[in-house]
Image (cartoon, rainbow, N blue to C red):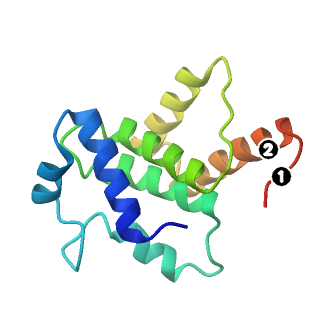
């Protein structure tokens, strides 16, 4: 897994692109390091998890965290989803693409934001989709 700083940099790049704000400007306005860092909070939870979270669980938790805490001025749902996909790609874990993806993914994130489902239920949904994608590709990846 990439370093915390590398992942936070990737997140700022994704958010900057989606928000049409330079990542450097976001870096100056959103604290990412130290005790004041809202964006570092998920990493603290990852380190304290027992048993340790898998790469898929971490990606899903970070996507859920962004959607629920909304650290950016807008587009948090989309940023959370894009960052989750980037983390899955970095971990070399597949994400399936189905015909109803636009609706299904949007609906699941909306349920998460409105607390119709918990973060744990969201993580379970992401893990199931990744398992389906692995089976479609011929078996689970290491």
Left or right? Give the position of 81 relative to 50.
left
Q: Position of residue 107 (x, y in %)?
A: 51, 29
Category of crowding for the residue at label 1, using alpha-carbon neighbours closer than 10 angstroms: few (below 14), some (14–19), many (at least 20) = some
Residue ID at (60%, 51%):
121
Rounded to the nearest angstrom, the CA distance separating label 1 from label 2 is 5 Å
Left or right? Give the position of 30 relative to 66.
left
Residue nearer the viewer, 129 or 69: 129
Left or right? Give the position of 128 relative to 82.
right
Q: Is residue 131 above or below residue 38?
A: above
The residue that disc 2 covers is 134
The residue that disc 1 covers is 140
Residue ID at (52%, 53%):
87
The N terminus lies in which quarter of the figure? bottom right
The reply to whether the C-beta atoms of the residues labelled 1 and 2 are less than 8 Å apart is yes
Category of crowding for the residue at label 2, using alpha-carbon neighbours closer than 10 angstroms: few (below 14), some (14–19), many (at least 20) = some
Residue nearer the viewer, 111 or 73: 73
């Amino acid at each position: 897994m990439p370093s915390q700083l590398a992942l936070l940099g990737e997140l700022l790049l994704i958010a900057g692109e989606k928000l049409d704000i330079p990542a450097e400007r976001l870096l100056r306005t959103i604290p990412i390091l130290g005790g004041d860092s809202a964006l570092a909070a998920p990493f603290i939870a990852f380190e304290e998890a027992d048993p340790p979270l898998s790469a898929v669980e971490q990606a899903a938790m970070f996507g859920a965290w962004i959607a629920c805490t909304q650290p950016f001025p807008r587009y948090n749902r989309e940023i959370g989803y894009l960052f989750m996909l980037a983390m899955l790609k970095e971990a070399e874990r597949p994400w399936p693409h189905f015909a109803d993806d636009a609706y299904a993914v949007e609906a699941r994130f909306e349920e998460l934001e409105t607390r119709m489902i918990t973060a744990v239920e969201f993580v379970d949904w992401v893990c199931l989709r990744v398992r389906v994608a692995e089976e479609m590709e011929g078996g689970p990846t290491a």
